[in-house]
Amino acid sequence: MLKLGSRTVLLPVDLQRAFDGAPWPPRNNPAADENGLALLAAWRQNGWPVIHVRHDSIVPGSTLGPGMPGHAFRPGFSPRESEALVTKSVNSAFIGTDLDLRLKRLQAEEVVVFGISTDMCVSTTVRTGANMGWRMILAADACFCFDQRDLDGTLIPAETMHRAHLATLAAEFATALSTAALLEAARPGRSS
């Protein structure tokens, strides 16, 4: 049975307002925010470490650029004063940041990742972290994807994108679990 403890770091990725409108296409998993907020609340209640990740786009005109309304955190996801913030300008939260060093200083044993989007920044962060030797855990129902078109222009629905990326990540890069399973493993008295 999975036990999580004070060396389990929660890593919310790119929980920003820009993803709620244009130019982003339709998405899947409307429960992702609710599930992510439940994880954040559990970590805060336990006093466990949280490192927030924010995308600071350097692309001119990006809705994720600093100073743009979409750059702001989604409701409930802003870091608290005691919580760390890592900013990135590429897909992986490990590239060009001090995330690896922060995890080492915390003597992290595993990293629980959730956020936006499953197939982009979440996937890239999980893959990089696993390749760097971290034990990555993916909160599978606290992420979402957007509809994408393949090379022939055929629409791939967001749910299909999400499921395919979860399957790939779970096959080699992370343990993929539901929010309910993670909350059970984080319940006081169950931790290591």
Image: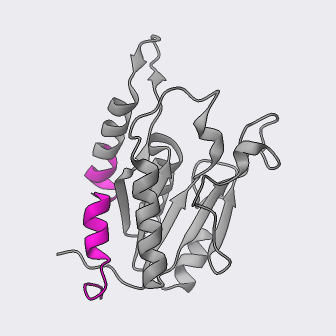
Residue 131: in sight, yes or no? no
Q: Is residue 90 left or right of residue 141?
A: right
Residue farthest left in this picture = 1
Q: Quadrant of residue 110?
A: bottom left
Q: Is residue 192 left or right of residue 52?
A: left
Please name the residue shown 60% across and 69% down the image: 99
* 144 versus 134 height, above or below: above
What are the residue bounds of the magenta stretch?
A: 168-192
Please name the residue shown 65% across and 41% down the image: 18
User: How far from the left and from the top, in percent, is residue 36?
Assistant: 44, 58
Of 169 and 139, nearer the camera is 139
User: How far from the left and from the top, in percent, is residue 150?
Assistant: 44, 19
Residue 189: in sight, yes or no? yes
User: How far from the left and from the top, in percent, is residue 70?
Assistant: 70, 43
Of 43 and 147, nearer the camera is 43
User: How far from the left and from the top, in percent, is residue 78?
Assistant: 63, 63
Q: Is residue 100 magenta?
A: no
Q: Is residue 181 magenta?
A: yes
Q: Is residue 189 left or right of residue 125?
A: left
- Give the position of the C terminus as an image quadrant: bottom left
* 91 versus 50 height, above or below: above
Please name the residue shown 76% across and 44% down the image: 69
